[in-house]
Image: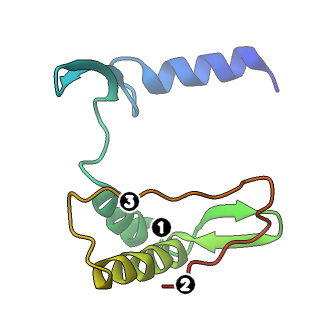
């Protein structure tokens, strides 16, 4: 990988006016680095991505490929399962996975 090209691309994306402009904000009394132009939520990101690029590849893992639409559908199944378990907006959910052992993970709720 040509690191100078990577650095130039990162600078263009993250600098003021860039697609992923970063800055700082105080959140709960702590100054944090944030994306200033980030979508307001993952739901907003995915619904727009599905509308714009639903059939395009979103995620590739070894030989598996998922489109934006397929990833959104899987996320919806997880959300519905968590909701059935009583998880509501604002609740925190932890996921623990041994990344060394996992070759393929399927969420079943």
* Residue plotted at (36% across, 26% down): 21
- Which one is in front in this view, the residue at disc 2 or the one at disc 1? 2
Real-space Cα separation, disc 1 to disc 3, in angstroms: 28 Å
Q: Which residue is mark 3?
A: 93
The secondary structure type at the circle numbered 2 is loop
Residue 93: name its quadrant.
bottom left
Tell me which label, 2 or 1, sits earlier in the chain: 1
Q: Work out whether 18 lies above or below 69.
A: above
Q: Nearer the viewer, residue 59 or 6?
A: 59
Q: Is residue 72 left or right of residue 40?
A: right
Q: Work out whether 2 lies above or below 78.
A: above
Quadrant containing the N terminus in the rendered view: top right
Q: Position of residue 23 (x, y in %)?
A: 31, 19
The secondary structure type at the circle numbered 3 is loop
Q: Is residue 85 left or right of residue 8?
A: left
Tell me which label, 1 or 3, sits earlier in the chain: 1
Q: Is residue 42 left or right of residue 108?
A: left
Real-space Cα separation, disc 2 to disc 1, in angstroms: 27 Å
Instruction: Look at the image and tell me whether residue 17 can be seen.
Output: no
Real-space Cα separation, disc 2 to disc 3, in angstroms: 16 Å
Q: Position of residue 36 (x, y in %)?
A: 28, 30
* Residue plotted at (76% across, 63% down): 102
The secondary structure type at the circle numbered 1 is helix
Residue 87: name its quadrant.
bottom left
Disc ID at residue 53: 1
Q: Which residue is mark 2?
A: 108
Q: Nearer the viewer, residue 94 or 31?
A: 94
Query: How many numbered markers are drawn?
Result: 3
* Residue plotted at (48% across, 85% down): 109
């Amino acid at each position: 990988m040509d690191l100078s090209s990577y650095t130039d691309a990162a600078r263009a994306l993250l600098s003021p006016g860039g697609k992923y402009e970063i800055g700082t904000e105080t959140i709960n009394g702590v100054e944090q680095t944030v994306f200033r132009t980030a979508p307001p939520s993952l739901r907003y990101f995915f619904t727009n991505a599905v509308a714009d690029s639903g059939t395009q590849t979103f995620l590739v893992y070894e030989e598996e490929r998922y489109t934006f639409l397929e990833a959104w559908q899987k996320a919806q199944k997880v959300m519905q399962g968590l909701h059935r378990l009583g998880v509501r907006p604002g609740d925190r959910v932890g996921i623990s996975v041994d990344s060394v052992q996992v070759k393929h993970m399927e969420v079943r709720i």
